[in-house]
Amino acid sequence: MGVPGLQAALRRAWGRWPARPGPRAPGLPIMAGKEMHPARASHQQDRKARGGWIWEDAQYPPKRLRGSEDEERPRKLPKRKIVLLMAYSGKGYHGMQRNVGSSQFKTIEDDLVSALVQAGCIPENHGEDMRKMSFQRCARTDKGVSAAGQVVSLKVWLIDDILDKINSHLPSHIRILGLKRVTGGFNSKNKCDARTYLYMLPTFAFAHKDRDVQDETYRLSPETLRLVNRLLSCYKGTHSFHNFTSQKGPREPSARRYILDMYCEEPFLREGLEFAVIKVKGQSFMMHQIRKMVGLVVAIVKGYAPESVLERSWGEEKVDVPKAPGLGLVLERVHFEKYNQRFGGDGLHEPLDWAQEEGKVAAFKEQHIYPTIVSTERDERSMAQWLSTLPVHDFSATALAAARTGTKVPSPLDGSEGEGDGDTD
């Protein structure tokens, strides 16, 4: 082959030979560790356009995997089971428990649920059906009854600054004072071992019946205070309290209740009027039970009833027991001893003792509960009016005998003071 022929052959084969090593032009693909000749790269780009390989430098974004869009969307917060420590002044409310569909009687839970929805803790449909958030209260306080340590359990979204946001949508006389995480199956009513109530009353209620029914100069003497505490201590233990509620027979097991403690504290002055606080701790209480326990002791101390009526009231006969006004009754604290023993020290859950919130509880009582009781007593004179009905009661006869003789047993002047105590089982 001559020189011209050799040169032609070399030109024909030149396109198949690899280029000399050197810098690779930008954008050219790499195959098996070698740089590709420009002509061959152009051929590969054509195949790429026809649906061949997908290259690293492809201009089209890679196909998204399933679920990647969900990860980029805002995720909903998981619901968590919690308990809230509540305090409220019950004046003007028809109790704690919400009556869904009834706007005529406003309750504490109406305001609470509204605040939870507005704060973004629960969806709106949970407010309409409280079972969806597993809502339960420890005690069903009744009309006019206040609370300094009510506890409710529910499922919520744990948003940031949750307590401040809830309280911002509540009136000042209803406060959420604390929050704790609890086990998923926690039920505040069923897990509650005991409840402590206080009953605040003017001490002239203990004055002898011969004195003025509302003598604001009366001061409780140490001797009378000892008598009051001796009588209150008689309630300790297990008794049938069928005479201290309604629609309970003497032999019904549910009428038997266990009282752990009951006593009267030292008196104190408020706006020139002396008051005292009676505290009672029990496993559970029936409707009106605490008010009747206080009412009967007041009747004995004043001289209207003999001390023997206490023992008789726990027997099978029906005894006429007066019911003190609802004003002054406060749910002070609920207890979870068994829950704390099992879960409080496991390192995963907090004990439900609310020790860190005691200062807030005391401050709320001083700011909202005690002043309301004092001012309402002065304006409405509920205790004085109730005391004037005691002479009509016949403590020497049973209520059944009084009914046979036509003796009318008056009902206490409830008005806005309240209808009952705590939980009815």
Image (cartoon, helix red, strand yellow):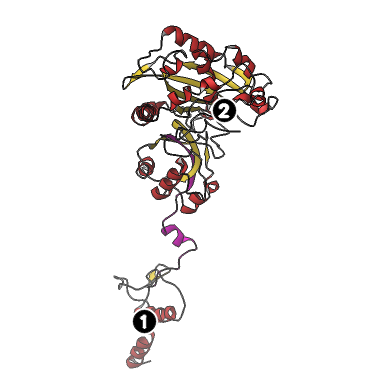
Task: Provide the residue designation for mark 2.
Answer: 285
User: Around disc 1, counting alpha carbons within 10 Å, would you say few (fewer than 14), some (14 to 19), or many (20 or more)?
Assistant: few
Q: Secondary structure at mark 2?
A: loop
Q: Amino acid at mark 2?
A: Phe
Residue 129 visible in the displayed image: yes
Q: Nearer the viewer, residue 298 or 138?
A: 298
Quarter holding residue 220: top left
Residues tagged 1 and 2 counted as in contact (Cβ below 8 A): no
- The mark found on residue 308 in the picture is none
Residue 157 visible in the displayed image: no
Q: Secondary structure at mark 1?
A: helix
The residue shown at (37%, 75%) is: 36
Q: How many marks?
A: 2
Say whether residue 218 is left or right of residue 79: left
Q: Is-magenta flag for residue 83? A: yes
In space, the residues marked 1 and 2 are separated at their CA atoms by 95 Å
The residue shown at (44%, 72%) is: 54
- Given this view, does label 1 or label 2 mark the residue nearer the observer? 2
The residue shown at (45%, 6%) is: 223
Task: Provide the residue designation for mark 1.
Answer: 39
Q: Which residues are magenta?
A: 60-89
